[in-house]
């Protein structure tokens, strides 16, 4: 087995190295062939591993592959822990990655950085696999940072565009805040358990929940709670939870395929995966769970609201991703880890689908992203239309589609949860269902139905609006799609539509494994839930099968809220567009608040960025220039130079001076030690 | 006292070197100048043969012979092999230098071999007599080698200074030994040690005198402040090939006699010589590093750098623990390798009628030869103690040993002066990489020299990545 796991991890790395270092030699076709082959190998082997673990009941694999170093009894290793949770993640990651690889051939065909792009996404696949297959915190951290690095590189892929550079810096810096917490959390665990191995740390969990730590003198906090919250801060950065979510919408500056792969399906769910993996720790700390729950609920609802006022097609999907990540986090907080991971999986399929569909629309519109200049695309792009419809229905949780099962599972679990804050979270996630349906179908109707607004846009008007628009969506010019004016949309090539179709299939079907996933023992020992918190088990008592679940779901409020959202979107944007304008005028202040995204960016820019710059400048002026540079560095250098210049004169060259120095030395030794 | 026939097995390498040196001396008389390579080849053969013999005869147990005045143990085996190898490299580097200056004579190699023999005796000495015998054999060879280029006024001056000061130091060492003989009634290191253990008299004035004189003698040979004055003048004045020799192998022998005399013989007085060595170490670190900054001549700069390295070696010894001795041994071995490379670079850049002695001669070396600029960079980094070069681990080992015996202030002091020292090493690197070359002439192409110098430089980084190889040898050789 070890060789198979190694092959799964290393195949994409090999592809990345070949495409990255020898891209010029092997050319475009060579680059995409080698990387797609690498990922395809990973995918097929992952499929086999999934079968071996899930269907043939292979033993949980936990072994070290390579010992990097041993320092002070702490082993730094590369190792794999493969159980059902890992196998599922591997399958999701390699499948979505493969789809995105294929799709990229069509999306990036005119881009000068073609080979570089393939090298990056293959490198990403490698890093993500390292992350999910880790059996220790060191490797987890490596994967965590490596995916962050590739994300940074890809957001700034079009590095000549200032907005992209701004966005990737932002993503990098915000993630630094999260990672700071993350590594402190790992440090806290290491401090107590003296090991980086998952299982060894989990074995100490009981003791850790008793231990206390005094961070501010005079206060005693549970070590486990502190460690869990710190780890979760890492997850907040990576999985874009309030208030560390600010980087994700801006990350849409990157090419659409990576928005699908990294910023929707896989990397951003690393935080969710990590918390699920750490369930033996989180379960023992109610305070940490409560924190997770509240943060997740806030993200789920308030980020969804922002999605309503966005006009950039990719940003709508981005805010929807934020909101869905919030749902997953809520599930974790309610101890329904299985539901969270289940939603992670279904979301990976339908959100990758939605992003790729959005990308397909963007290609057809010649890199126009403003929905106000789309409309009526249904008859031009039938495949994109159908697949986007499937994705949207899955997203809003329409019965029978994948999202329905996972999201319903989460909402039901929260309603049963007794973790502090559960009631608050329940209200928010319920309201979130309406919001989700509303913005999803607002986007859907604006893009695919209604009048063909792209025909009304005059060349000049288009161009002016282009600059006036504050969402920075002038993506076209780098691609040779630069001709403006009326466009004639047409369906995208097969490399784009085939991945859409292949992703649409699991977006419908992935939900039907709800029984074993949520209520069976699919995850086995991978996820640990304390007896008292086990909401899914209580939920499972009433589970009678998939059909029963659907029928039951149709009688519950989430379904009706979703329908209400869908209907109001239809009524407002298809029937009476005047309502939207009137509401915007009536609730000017609310619109402003949402359009400004609650002012997080302004606050961060002013307080944190401004504060850091101010602090830095003050330290530079007084600490660096005056004290360190002036006094310490230059001062001591000058002193040494001064002494040196004079000390060399003691070397006179006269023999008797030398002999004299020796005699003096001897006398000093004798006198000092004899008396 | 019956006269027994001594066991000749442990001294076979010494006998071999002695025999070969005498033979080469005679053969050289009949070799025409054009065939001088014969002498060179025989000298290298002698060193290789001695290395083979030493390794073949090496055994883990300690062997004594000549009425217990001669010892062969792990330390002696390791140090002797190191001396052969370093000397072989020195001979190799020296050849083009000597040829270019028309002093490619057999005497250089014969004197070198006698020096090696002296070092071997020092390394294996277990009595004051043998120790002094070896020391003088080495010193006399070195005096003659410094004056080897007899037409050079500077070399003659340096040789004269070296000889006179060396005589004073030898006299002091001898005086210290005679006081010890007076107190203990023996010249045998083992018996001196036993006497000091049994007579719990502690430190009295005669002993302090003896100790002080002995330490002055040893400090002079190593070049510790304030007995260092000869070092810059001799390094500067001697032909570079001789500087190369003085700067490398004799340090290993110097460490050996410190181990035999101070650690083995005067071990019971550790507390007292620890204090004396501390003074010497502190002064060496400070003077060596600070004064090196003001030097513009790279040979003088390396001389002061040597002084500061001696400070580090003394720190390892004064810790007085197994780790400390092992660290000092490791440091000395590393120093010999790095110094050989450093002086080798100077020889490489020199040519007929031109001595690349000044720092300015290294200007823009990167443009003339990126590869050797890189080798020099490795050597400079290693001297400065920048990881991952081996110099870092050498310094680390010594500092660890000192910290273990709670002399943290000394460790901090050493680190601060290492930082001061980093300045002039990095300045050399800066000059090589960022300045424009003043001298555009291509580097000479001697294949053997280029290859060995490259290996020498790369060894610095290979040992830095795998310090365990050398460290385990050093730890294994130290039995205290």
Image: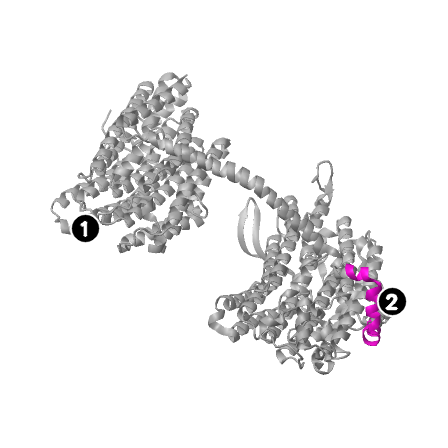
Give the quadrant of the N terminus of chain B: top left
User: Residue A284: x percent and y percent?
Assistant: 75, 49
Residue B245 drawn above or below residue A238:
above
Neighbour class for label 2 at 10 Å: few (<14), some, many (≥20)? few
Quarter-of-image position of residue A217: top right
Q: Quick check: B210 left or right of A189?
A: left
For residue B37, the mark is 1
- Whole-number angstrom distance, CA of label 1 to CA of label 2: 100 Å
At 29% across and 50% down in the image, what residue appears? B348
- Name the residue beneath numbered marker 2: A556
Q: Quick check: B159 left or right of A138?
A: left
User: Residue A168: x percent and y percent?
Assistant: 61, 60
Whether A591 is among the magenta residues is yes
**Callout 1: chain:** B
Is residue A342 visible to us here? no
**Callout 2: chain:** A
Depth check: give the residue in front, A673 or B97. Answer: B97
User: Residue B125: x percent and y percent?
Assistant: 30, 33
Q: Quick check: B254 left or right of A574?
A: left
Which is the main secondary structure of the residues drawn in magenta? helix
Q: Which residues are magenta?
A: A569-593
Residue A532 drawn above or below residue A99:
above
Quarter-of-image position of residue A267: bottom right
User: Residue A225: x percent and y percent?
Assistant: 73, 47
Residue A646 drawn above or below residue A162:
above
Counting every numbered tag in the picture gives 2
Depth check: give the residue in front, A209 or A618. Answer: A618
For residue B139, the mark is none
Neighbour class for label 1 at 10 Å: few (<14), some, many (≥20)? some
Is residue A481 visible to us here? yes
Kind of element beneath mark 1: helix
């Amino acid at each position: 087995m070890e060789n198979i796991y190694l092959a799964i991890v290393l195949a994409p790395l090999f592809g990345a190295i070949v495409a990255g270092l020898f891209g010029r030699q092997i050319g475009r076709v060579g680059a995409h062939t080698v990387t797609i082959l690498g990922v395809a190998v990973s995918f097929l082997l992952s499929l086999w591993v999934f079968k071996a673990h899930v269907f043939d009941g292979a033993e949980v694999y936990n072994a070290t592959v390579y010992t990097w170093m041993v320092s002070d009894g702490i082993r730094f290793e590369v190792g794999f822990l493969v159980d059902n949770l890992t196998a599922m993640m591997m399958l999701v990651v390699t499948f979505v990655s493969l789809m995105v690889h294929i799709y990229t051939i069509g999306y990036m065909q005119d881009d000068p950085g073609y080979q570089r792009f393939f090298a990056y996404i293959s490198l990403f696949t490698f890093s993500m696999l390292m992350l999910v297959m880790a059996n220790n915190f060191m490797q987890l951290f490596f994967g965590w940072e490596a995916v962050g690095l590739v994300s940074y590189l890809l957001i700034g892929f079009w590095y000549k565009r200032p907005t992209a550079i701004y966005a990737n810096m932002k993503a990098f810096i915000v993630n630094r805040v999260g990672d700071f917490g993350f590594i402190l959390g790992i440090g806290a665990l290491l401090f107590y358990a003296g090991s980086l191995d998952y299982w060894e740390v989990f074995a100490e969990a009981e003791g850790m929940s008793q231990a206390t730590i005094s961070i501010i003198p005079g206060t005693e906090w549970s070590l486990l709670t502190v460690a869990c919250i710190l780890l979760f801060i890492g997850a907040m950065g990576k999985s874009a939870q309030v208030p560390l979510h600010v980087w994700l919408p801006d990350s849409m500056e990157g090419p659409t395929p990576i928005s699908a792969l990294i910023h929707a399906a896989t990397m951003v769910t690393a935080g969710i995966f990590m918390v699920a993996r750490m369930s033996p720790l989180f379960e023992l700390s109610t305070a940490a769970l409560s924190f997770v729950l509240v943060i997740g609920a806030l993200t789920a609802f308030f980020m969804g609201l922002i999605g309503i006022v966005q006009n950039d097609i990719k940003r709508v999907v981005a805010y929807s991703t934020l909101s869905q990540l919030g749902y997953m986090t809520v599930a974790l907080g309610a101890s329904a880890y299985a539901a969270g991971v289940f939603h992670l999986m279904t979301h990976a399929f339908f959100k990758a689908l939605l992003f790729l569909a959005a990308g397909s629309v963007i290609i057809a519109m010649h890199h126009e992203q403003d929905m106000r200049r789309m409309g009526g695309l249904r008859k031009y792009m039938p495949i994109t239309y159908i697949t986007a419809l499937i994705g949207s229905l899955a997203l809003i949780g329409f019965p029978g589609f994948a999202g329905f099962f996972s999201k319903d599972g989460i909402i039901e679990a929260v309603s049963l949860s007794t973790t502090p804050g559960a009631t608050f979270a329940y209200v928010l996630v319920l309201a979130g269902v309406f919001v989700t349906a509303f913005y999803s179908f607002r986007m859907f109707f604006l893009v695919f139905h209604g009048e063909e607004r792209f025909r009304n846009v005059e060349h000049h008007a288009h161009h002016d609006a282009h600059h006036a628009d504050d969402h920075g969506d002038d993506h076209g010019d780098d691609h040779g799609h630069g001709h403006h004016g009326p466009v004639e949309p047409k369906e995208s090539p097969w490399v784009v539509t085939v991945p859409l179709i292949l992703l649409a299939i699991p977006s419908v079907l992935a939900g039907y494994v709800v029984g074993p996933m949520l209520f069976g023992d699919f995850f086995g020992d991978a996820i640990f839930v304390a007896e008292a918190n086990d909401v899914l088990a209580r939920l499972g008592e009433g589970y009678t099968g998939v059909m029963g679940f659907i029928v039951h779901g149709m009688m519950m409020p989430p379904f009706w809220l979703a329908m209400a959202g869908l209907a109001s979107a239809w009524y407002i944007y298809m029937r009476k567009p005047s309502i939207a304008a009137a509401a915007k005028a009536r609730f000017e202040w609310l619109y402003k608040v949402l359009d400004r995204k609650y002012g997080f960016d302004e606050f961060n820019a002013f307080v944190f960025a401004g504060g850091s710059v101010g602090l830095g400048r003050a330290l530079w002026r007084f600490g660096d220039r005056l004290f360190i540079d002036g006094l310490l560095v230059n001062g001591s250098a000058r002193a040494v130079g001064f002494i040196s210049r004079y000390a060399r004169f003691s070397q006179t060259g006269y023999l008797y001076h030398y002999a004299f120095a020796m005699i003096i030395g001897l006398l000093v030794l004798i006198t000092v030690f004899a008396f | 006292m019956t006269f027994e026939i001594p066991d000749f097995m442990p001294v076979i390498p010494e006998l071999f070197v002695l025999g070969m040196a005498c033979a080469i001396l005679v053969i050289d008389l009949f070799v025409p100048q054009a065939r001088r390579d014969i002498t060179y080849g025989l000298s290298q053969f002698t060193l290789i043969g001695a290395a083979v013999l030493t390794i073949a005869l090496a055994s883990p147990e300690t062997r004594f012979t000549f009425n217990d005045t001669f010892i062969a143990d792990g330390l002696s085996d390791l140090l002797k092999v190191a001396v052969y190898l370093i000397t072989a490299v020195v001979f190799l580097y020296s050849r083009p230098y000597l040829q270019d200056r028309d002093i490619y004579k057999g005497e250089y190699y014969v004197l070198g071999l006698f020096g090696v023999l002296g070092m071997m005796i020092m390394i294996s000495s277990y009595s004051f007599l043998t120790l002094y015998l070896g020391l003088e054999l080495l010193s006399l060879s070195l005096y003659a080698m410094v004056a080897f280029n007899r037409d050079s006024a500077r070399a003659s001056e340096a040789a004269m200074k070296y000889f006179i000061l060396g005589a004073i130091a030898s006299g002091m060492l001898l005086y210290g030994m005679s006081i010890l003989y007076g107190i203990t009634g023996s010249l045998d290191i083992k018996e001196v040690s036993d006497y000091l253990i049994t007579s719990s008299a502690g430190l009295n004035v005669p002993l302090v005198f003896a100790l002080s004189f002995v330490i002055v003698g040893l400090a002079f040979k190593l070049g510790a402040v304030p007995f260092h004055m000869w070092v810059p003048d001799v390094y500067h004045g001697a032909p570079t090939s001789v500087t190369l020799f003085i700067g490398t192998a004799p340090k290993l022998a110097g460490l050996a006699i410190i181990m035999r005399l101070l650690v083995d013989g005067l071990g019971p007085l550790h507390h007292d010589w620890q204090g004396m060595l501390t003074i010497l170490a502190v002064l060496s670190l400070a003077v060596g590093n600070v004064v090196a900054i003001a030097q513009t001549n790279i040979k003088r700069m390396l001389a002061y750098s040597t002084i500061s390295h001696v400070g580090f070696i003394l720190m390892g010894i004064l810790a007085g623990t197994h780790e400390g001795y092992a660290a000092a041994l490791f440091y000395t071995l590393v120093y010999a390798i790095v110094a050989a490379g450093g002086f080798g670079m100077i020889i490489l850049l020199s040519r007929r009628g031109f001595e690349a002695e000044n720092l300015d001669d290294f200007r823009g070396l990167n443009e003339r030869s990126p590869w050797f600029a890189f080798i020099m960079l490795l050597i400079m980094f290693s001297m400065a103690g920048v990881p991952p070069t081996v110099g870092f681990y050498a310094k680390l080992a010594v500092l660890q040993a000192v910290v273990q015996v709670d002399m943290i202030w000394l460790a901090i002091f050493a680190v601060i002066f290492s930082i001061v020292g980093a300045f002039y090493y990095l300045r050399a690197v800066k000059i090589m990489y960022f300045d424009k070359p003043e001298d555009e002439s291509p580097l000479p192409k001697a294949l053997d020299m280029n290859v060995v110098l490259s290996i020498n430089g790369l060894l610095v980084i290979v040992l830095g990545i795998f310090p365990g190889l050398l460290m385990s040898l050093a730890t294994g050789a130290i039995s205290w």
